[in-house]
Image (cartoon, rainbow, N blue to C red):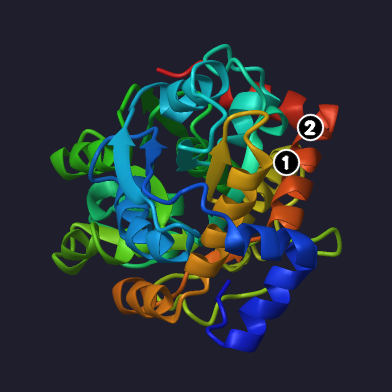
Amino acid sequence: MRLTSSVAGWTAALLATYWPADVASAQSSNVYAGKTLRIIVGLEAGGTADVFARGFAAHLKKHIPGNPTIVVQNMPSAGGSSAINYLAERAAPDGLTIIYNPFHPLAQALGDQALRTRYDQLDYVGATGDIRVDYMRTDTVKGGAKKPSDIIKADMVIVGQQSSTDFSGTLAYLGLQVLGVKARRITGYRGGSDIFLAMQRGEVQYHNTSIGTFRTRSAAFIRAGDGIGVSYLVPVDANGNYERSRFVTEMPAFPDLYKKIHGKLPSGSTWDAFNWLTNQVGEMSFIGLAPPSTSPEALAALRLGFERASHDPDFIKESEAKNGIAYSYVSVRRGEAIIRALAEVSPEVISTLRTAIGPAN
């Protein structure tokens, strides 16, 4: 998923998202002049979402009409649910407080009590998508893993996750189940950085993260031979079609890994649940939200700023230099459609997720 840096490209996308009157209103708005915008990140400092939010904030400031001061605040706990609850229950709808969080569809789909609101009850600002990858400690396999398909030789794989509805931990765990590899989970970590530290200690053996994090935070770990990429995740349609990424060469796409091991494409109820979750978070990894009933003027300015910052050539250049790939932008129209689809997830998928995830260790 790659952004275009052409002015024509993002202008067309912008006009497809807003009516011209809304764009003009947002451009001329002074609601943020002299104000401070607080962006809450529901994870620990130094994690993928936090680093992205802080880097993105510099570009966002340039594109929100009124050029507000932007402050990023961390509110880690419960896989980011506390930040979402704060936004829904305590933050004023004046547009001066938003969150930028990993999108956790499982928390809503499975009725996690830690999440006291629903995504469709909050005002969508914008979102970014990323490519998710699985990697493991090489000593997960006796004698050391030499190639991704060696994962099938593992006797038992330990997966780290923040909570039972943490999508990264769930993707890793479900993917192993689809492959036919036994796994158990350790929950309670404060974020991806915490899980990576546990992985370095040997407490955790397997982790799902973004391709950008794999290429930055985990790079030395991989170069030292302590870890190896296993697969990157791609959505697969009902006919078994999927699109490989030309930007990821370190590891195979998950369906290709499965075919390498089993000689066919994956199928079955666990695969269906895993593929549903891949579709949800693969397109919309990190989401920007405002309190319910946020001032229309402020919301329009936030959405305009978020979209323009996402298509800022300097931001794209920075992302490509750091990750080898740019983040994709999820428009208001598309983002709201994904959130609606979350509310319509099939009972069969929910049942399979509940059974497959089970109680964590």
Q: Is residue 187 above or below residue 179?
A: above
Horizontal and vertical percent for residue 52?
35, 55
Question: Going 69% across and 65% down the picture, which residue do you hit?
Answer: 24
The quarter of the displayed image where residue 128 is located: bottom right
Place of residue 284 in the rendered image (x, y in percent of width and height, measured from the top left): 60, 52
State if disc 2 and disc 1 touch (CB < 8 Å).
yes
- Let me know if residue 44 appears in the view: yes
Q: Residue at x 29, y 45 (%)?
A: 47
- Who is closer to the viewer here, 220 or 141? 220
- Name the residue at 55% across, 51% down: 302
Residue 282 seen in render: no
Q: Quadrant of residue 9?
A: bottom right
Q: For mark 1, what is the residue? A: 339
Q: Position of residue 132 (x, y in %)?
A: 49, 56
Q: Is residue 321 above or below residue 337?
A: below
The amino acid on which the numbered mark 1 sits, given as a three-letter code, is Ile
Residue 109 position, x and y percent, is 69, 27
> Number of callouts in the render?
2
Rendered-image quadrant of the C terminus: top left
Residue for point 54% across, 46% down: 287
Location of the N terminus by quadrant is bottom right
Residue 90: mark: none
In-image side of 129 versus 14 (left or right): left
Q: Quadrant of residue 113?
A: top right
Residue count near mark 2 (Cα–Cα under 10 Å), binned few <14, some 14–19, many ≥20: some
Q: CA distance from mark 1 to mark 2?
A: 7 Å
Identify the residue position indicated by label 2 in the image: 343
SS category of the residue bearing label 2: helix
Q: For the residue labelled by badge 1, is the local secondary structure a helix, a strand or a loop? A: helix
The answer to whether 21 appears left or right of 108 in the picture is: right
